[in-house]
Image (spheres, helix red, strand yellow):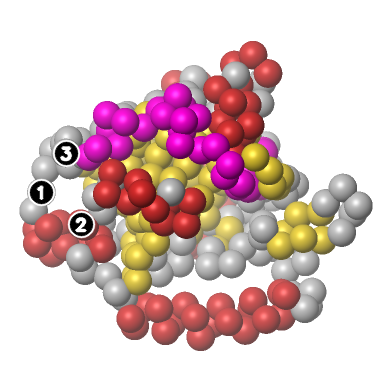
Amino acid sequence: MHNKILSYVQDILNNPLEEINKIERITHKDFHNTYTKNNIPVVMTKMMDHWLAKDKWNLEFFEKVGKDKQAFISKGNIRHDNTNWEFGNFLNYVKEIKNSNENKSDAYLSNLSLLKLFPELTDDVDFSLISNYKKYNSTSFWIGSPGTITGWHTDRLNDNILAQVYGKKLVFLVSPDQNSRMPLSNKYEPGSKLCAVSMENFNADKHAVFKDVMVKYIVLKPGTMLFIPKNWWHCVYGIDISISSNNFGHTVIDHFRMKSIERIKRILHSLGLYGKDCVCHYYDKNGKRQKR
């Protein structure tokens, strides 16, 4: 599947796709000085060898520990298409994903808080490469069907490590120095910035500027992690049934910068005065707008 995606993305672009640089291991200090401080992405292939999650986490494991849990699930590319959220039984969603090859589901348990849903699993992962240098950190996990798409977006001032535990994902990155070639979307997502470009339904007339963007990519395999620096655009495709975890981290200064700007937007948004088309709300069966 990933070769097909790489092929049609390359057909859009005037510049060749470039694979993200890989290393095996790195010390915390060298990672911070070389990659975090310089805002450079990198793939690390041996930094998860000690993770408990690497040997424990699969769908059967989450079926055992997920009883009586409730969670949100998304379907489709919610950043480019309709915002399709459901809230329900975590175990039922895991089973839907498990059978996705038969039921053709694109269900995605996305950006779920590990601490809130499974606090007992927090020691299964290790994001100290970032968390040791950041005041504010949040760890999430993701369980998805093949064919899930997380459209082009940035995580604002968060540095992000995405770790692949099970299955494969294809990730595309674009540097913030290419912002002029990334047309902004009118859709609102708290804490993020969205791009209007959909590579599945690319509009060459409307988004011709995107054709000249420089795009990096990596096929993330189990046991590998990707550092996504702050303000870097990224787009993620689920290749297999996959399980990932990630950590968002930012400094006190960046926290103040984000909150001071975002607070006003969120207040206006909660009042329905800003970002009526958004990722954070959905409509229930009665047509009532609900917050995710």
Tell me the residue at 31%/31% (across/down). 56
Is residue 68 rendered magenta in the image? yes
Q: Amino acid at mark 1?
A: Ile
Residue 215 visible at all? no
Q: Choose between 176 and 246: the one closer to the eye.
A: 246
Q: Whole-percent x and y of residue 208?
A: 61, 48
Q: Is residue 35 above or below residue 104?
A: below
Is residue 8 rendered magenta in the image? no
Alpha carbon distance from label 3 to label 1? 14 Å
Q: Secondary structure at mark 3?
A: loop
In the rendered image, which residue does mark 1 sit on? 26
Other-residue count near label 3 (Cα within 10 Å), few / some / many at <14 / 14–19 / ≥20: few
Tell me the residue at 46%/36% (across/down). 65
Q: Choose between 93 and 230: the one closer to the eye.
A: 93
Q: Is residue 242 above or below residue 130?
A: above
Other-residue count near label 2 (Cα within 10 Å), few / some / many at <14 / 14–19 / ≥20: many
State the extent of the magenta-drawn residues as a range: 51-78
Q: Whole-percent x and y of residue 215?
A: 41, 44
Alpha carbon distance from label 3 to label 2? 14 Å
Q: Choose between 142 and 277: the one closer to the eye.
A: 142
In the rendered image, which residue does mark 2 sit on? 129
Which quarter of the picture shows residue 23?
Answer: top left
Tell me the residue at 72%/75% (across/down). 270
Which quarter of the picture shows residue 104?
Answer: top right
Q: Quadrant of the C terminus?
A: bottom right
Q: Amino acid at mark 3?
A: His
Instruction: Report the side of 252 relative to 196 (left or right).
Output: left
Tell me the residue at 91%/52% (across/down). 286
